[in-house]
Amino acid sequence: MSSTSINPLSMSQLPMNQLPMKEYSAHRAAFFKKMPSNSVAFFPAGKELTRSNDTEFAFCQNKNFFYLTGFNEPDALLVLLKDEQDNNKSVLFSLPKDPLHEIWQGRRVGQIKAVEEYGVDESYELAEIDVLLSDYLDGKSQVLFGFNDDTFAAQVFTWLKQVKSRIRQGANAPEQLTDADPIIADLRLIKSENELALMRTANHISGLAHQRAMQKSQVGKLEYQIEAEILHEFARHGARHPAYASIVAGGDNANILHYTNNDDVLKDNELLLIDAGAELSGYAADITRTFPINGKFSAEQKTIYQLVLDAKNLAINAIKPGMCFAKLNVLTNTFLTQGLIDLGILVGDLDELMAEKKVKDYFIHGLGHWLGLDVHDVGDYQISLDKEQLRAFEVGMVMTIEPGIYIPLTDVNVDEKWRGIGVRIEDNIAVTADGFENLTTNSPQTIEEIEALMQAAKA
Ligand code: GLY
Ligand code: MN
Ligand code: MN
């Protein structure tokens, strides 16, 4: 990494911090192409979630709805209609403009701006859905909606029942129901140039936050104080929210995979594992770095760290169109197994240990996952009906690569000197025509880079 790459960009220099509206129209157009003639598709927005009594969590939009609209209010519904001649119409139902509500709770887009700014063909108040619904369903042969959302599925069945109850008046309810989730997952899996630009920015901001965490690390601080530094750096660069609850895990806490208590004291001679990524205009970064709290790796920490770093780079360098996670797993598991044999942590023959999957005692989780609007993004890992065919990487897919080695203090099977070490290193990778692009360019990762950055911060 060059020294210039750790200089923060100002907001105005950031290549992209939200998608142009035409991108959402393009997403709708792509979904329309997948709809059969004479069908209707429903996509509900997210709802506000109560934290306690009358206070809510920060709102997070339903990501399929967001992908198709860019609209960020709760309690809305997108209806996509395709007629027998394959003419398309998009209709957005949302909450009305309401002066009293807007004084207390905040501004709403309303129906006029929904058409003008969000580019849908028509927009109505949410309350009008019951009136218009039968027009949408009557005579259609197929309804598409996400089967994952059972509350909304119950709503669709209620609407279907309403149409069926008018059968003697000549109404015709659709008879075919199709799960929209896998269709939209396949679209979301391939990122456009604009989505990639946005994810690059989310990664850049997250890299700055990881740098700040390293600079602010100090024995005696609390983990959540470092978490606060990360959130501060996200916000400073235009990313209001983290993409997921940040993991800030000192010492043995790193061996708890989804540790988010973040309330322990940072101790001398221990490592700090930070898994934190910004969300930018809905898109996630997912980066992990592990570094010594006092700025200097011990010999054992260095050894495990270098093994994980080499495994990560081995996997990343093998990424290209046609590759798949299963093959990357074999490559990485073989490398880590041999590494652990060399250190005396695993004992035995490489082939036998591989057959027994013994590396999984120390590398507990998967090598990576799709990344996009969700941190664990949608999209199957095996395709074909029998789910046996492995999904090959294609240009525009984005994934994480995140090997780790976890040796809890309680592991009596290894030499004491290794115990309490937990290391994960995680980058975000886009598949390109000639291989890959590592989106994670400014999160220090070599031992030299990390120690130099931390020593400079102390000075
Ligand atoms: N941050 C969650 C994960 O790495 O999968
Ligand atoms: Mn992560
Ligand atoms: Mn991850």
Image (cartoon, rainbow, N blue to C red):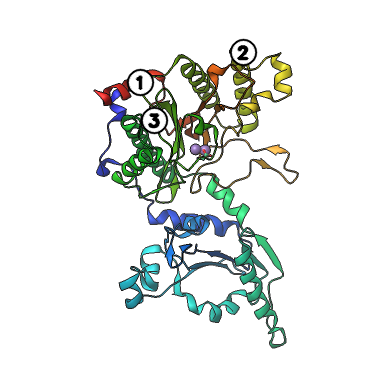
Q: In this view, does 413 lie above or below 104?
A: above
Pointer 3 or 2: first along the chain: 2
Q: Which of marks 2 and 1 is in front?
A: 2
Q: Is residue 104 above or below residue 323?
A: below
Q: In this view, does 144 lie above or below 191?
A: below
**Mark 3: which secondary structure?**
loop
Nearer the observer, 315 or 78: 315
In this image, 445 relative to 128: left or right? left
Query: Where residue 441 is drawn, which disc sits there?
Result: 3
Residue 441 in picture, x, y percent from top left: 39, 30
Query: Where residue 451 is drawn, which disc sits there?
Result: 1
Q: Is residue 240 above or below residue 406?
A: below
The residue to which callout 2 is attached is: 344
Q: Do the residues labelled 2 and 1 touch (CB within 8 Å)?
A: no
Q: Quadrant of the C terminus?
A: top left
Task: Count the numbered circles shown.
Answer: 3
